[in-house]
Image (spheres, helix red, strand yellow):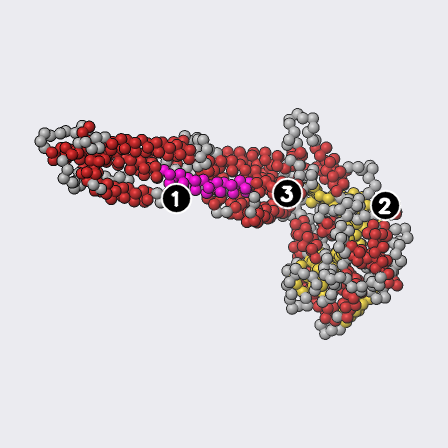
Amino acid sequence: MVTGMEFNSNNTLKRDLEKYAAQYAIEQERQGSLGDGRSSIHYPALFLFVGDLVAPAVSAVQEINRLKWDNGDGVVYVQIGTEDQEARPVETRNGGLSDDGQVTRHRLPLSTGQTERPSKTRRKDVHRSFHDSDQALFDLNRTLRRVSNRIAEYGRLYSSFDRIYVTVVTRADDPLNVLLPELTKLTETILSQAFKSVQTDLHVLVSEMEQVDSFGYASAAGLAFLRELDYMQSLDYTFSGKLLVTEDGISIPVTHPTSPLFDLVYLLSDKNERGTGVPGGWIENAEIICRICLLKNRKQDVDHSGSVSSTGANTYNNTSFKNNIRTTSDQHGYASAGFAEIRRPNKPIALAVLYHMYRYLLARMRQEPDWSIKDKLAFFGLDAASVERKVEGLLPDEDLVSGMSGIMTHNVSFSDLKPLSLREAERALFGQGAEAYFRDNVVRLVEERVRERSSGGSLRRQAEQSRAEHPEVGYFQWAAWSDGEPGSVREALLALIRDKSMQLESARALLEQRQQERVEDQSFKRALFRDKQNVRNLIDCMLERVYVPKVELLRLENELHLLRIYDTEMEELHRFSRHVTAALESLERTLRETAVQSIAAADEYIGQNVMEYYGKVTEELIIDLEAKRGRDVWFEDRYMGDMNRLATEGDDRLLKRLMEVCHSLLLTAEPLRLPFEEELLQRANVTIAYGDKDVLTRDDLFRRLYHTLEDQAVVRVRVFDYTQEHRYEEKYFFGDHHSAFMDYAAHAEETSRIYKLGVVYEERSSGVEKLNLMGGFHLEDLMVYRNGKVYYDSYTENGYELHPAGLVEKLSPIR
């Protein structure tokens, strides 16, 4: 059973592993021509997130841009929310501004009632309270001006500063989007003071999957916003409001001429065109938002003639796309997109290589040296010679028998002693004196010496000393040799204890037999008519026949006592070493589980055979490395060092060192830097025997990749196909200049294609991406629009006011 502490430790290890894998993936993504492999955007870019509900998307978009864009650190992000937004405790004195460099979070002092039951006039109240609060408008002005100045600081990162691309992102059901015209126009007006041109797109995120508890009001509010959006995008839309505020409190009008508010509007749902949910929900649309921005604002290259060109075939043309999605009635068309990527699964690769390397190191640690049982006993200081050295010196050095001969005796005649046994004769001669002398001068001294030599942990100290001379013998061997199984050191120790026990019993039996012998049967020299001399001779015989065996018995007893102490210590040593080896084995399971989970999270096709293929790759790298630098390179101090000692310091220390060594010795090797299609081809065929007809060819692979990308890049919005009369599509591949697959994709289906296909070349070989653009539909074509009508009608009939005052009359009727 896993304890709470072990569970928490396991979770910590997995988090560390995920960070390690993510860092490797980032490094691989950023590899290119000395850091120039990523795309760059041409003009400055600003992402404006409107509402509290889109706050999680800020970090997602920022991370993608930092990873994919060479000048992504110069992109500025603004999130405008309300004071109700939680988990953002930082509050500053400068007008509700929370700033961390690239990201600026501005809080409007408005109540949107996000955490309470929505009021019947929530959206209307938000709109009114914003216009009623001079301070809110002034603070917003100040924030946006600071943002404009910050963008200017990043000027060196861009090829041109004439234009700025503004990407507005909001959730359809967020009440703050009722202020979209005000927030958008104020942002554009302030930016236009620094840029010649401001181009603004809107991305509307629609959530259909998570509307469980608040599906009714969210659907009604979402439809209310879509109706307002239709009005904002109409050809005769105009806007005017006193939004610019000076430091003296003077309000200046801001106007929008007759035209749609946004250049293009993209609707992105957490369900795709087929009606199936998108893994990761609406937040996954961050990838699409970033790719669309890159497509429209990619850095242009200047060729040798001096003319400007964009690297790639059939590059994106924004004007052309807008014209193609406009209907015959000149009604504005909306757009959506789908995105797919196939890349080398860098995270699973990093984890798989780490697991296989660790597995190899554990196998090395488990290897048994070619030692005899005598060698193993000697390792613990339990061989016959070592035990003899431990036992010798326990007994006093002087002649015990001669020392006892001077003990005072009682006046007893030899004739009285003759019929007695040796035990009876001893008592008649000495009383308790001989036993007391032996106890005080021999037994106690031996016992004291035994205590000194059997201080706790002596066996483990001996093992540690021996390990310094034999580093190949670690805790796996300790655990195996001390477990008591056949062939183990402990079994030999127990056998020795049994043997000594038998010797002790024999010695006791011999002593008992001697003490029962009669005096007259003893073979010592007798003198005629010399009684005292005969008694003296009897005493010498008695000491030789009784007390010499007693000394031997004492030696055996204490030798056995020492051996039993060592057996107890060996039990403790087994528990210790088994605890360490169990932790090492547990780490192996954690590494495998994490790698398998990472593989499972990847696409089934793209993640195939990762463990099998990288098991072989790791094995080959290990063989090559050991051939060049020696078999013990892993255990040098600058790499893993003493893994047994590391293991006793905790899993986290061991794992940290393991990840460092894996990164420096294996992950940077050339076999792990293959172009993604070559890597995938080899991995797909790793389990196929040579000459097998099922081997995957390069053409087969390209065909599968092409269809996989198309299948996964399904447009992320649900429309009724039969009502969508003006569907228009463009599809773009993003991939490496030198990729054979990119060349294949550019020319596939050339004769049957009914959509525009573009190729955006980049200097990176880790994967390929596909962005499908689709436009020409109207809001009434959307499933979310049709499903929301019933809720919208019901809420309005029940007294809910879902629009700002005076706006309902301007909206087109619900279709």
Q: Residue furthest bottom?
A: 248
The residue singled out by tag 2 in the image is 721
* Disc 1, SS: loop
Q: What residue type is labelled 3?
A: Ser
Residue 651 visible? The answer is yes
Which of the two residues, 501 or 317, is positioned nearer the viewer here? Answer: 501
Is 581 within the magenta? yes
Q: Quadrant of residue 766?
A: top right
**Mark 3 or mark 1: whose residue is earlier in sequence:** 1
Three-letter code, disc 1: Gly
Count of marks placed on residues? 3
Q: Which residue is drawn at 46% across and 41% down?
A: 575
Residue position marked by numbered label 1 in the rendering: 457
The three-letter code of the residue at mark 2 reads Asp
Under circle 3, the secondary element is helix
The image quarter containing residue 33 is: top right
User: Whole-percent x and y of residue 350?
Assistant: 60, 42
| Residue that extends furthest to the left in the rendered view of this protein | 529
Residue 378 image offset from top left, x and y in percent: 37, 35
Q: Give the range drawn in magenta.
A: 563-588
Measured along the vertical axis of the image, is residue 287 above or below residue 520? below
Badge 2 density bin: few <14, some 14–19, many ≥20, Cα 10 Å: few
In the picture provided, is 758 more to the left or to the right than 644?
right
Q: Which residue position holds label 3?
A: 598
Q: Nearer the viewer, residue 557 or 124?
A: 557
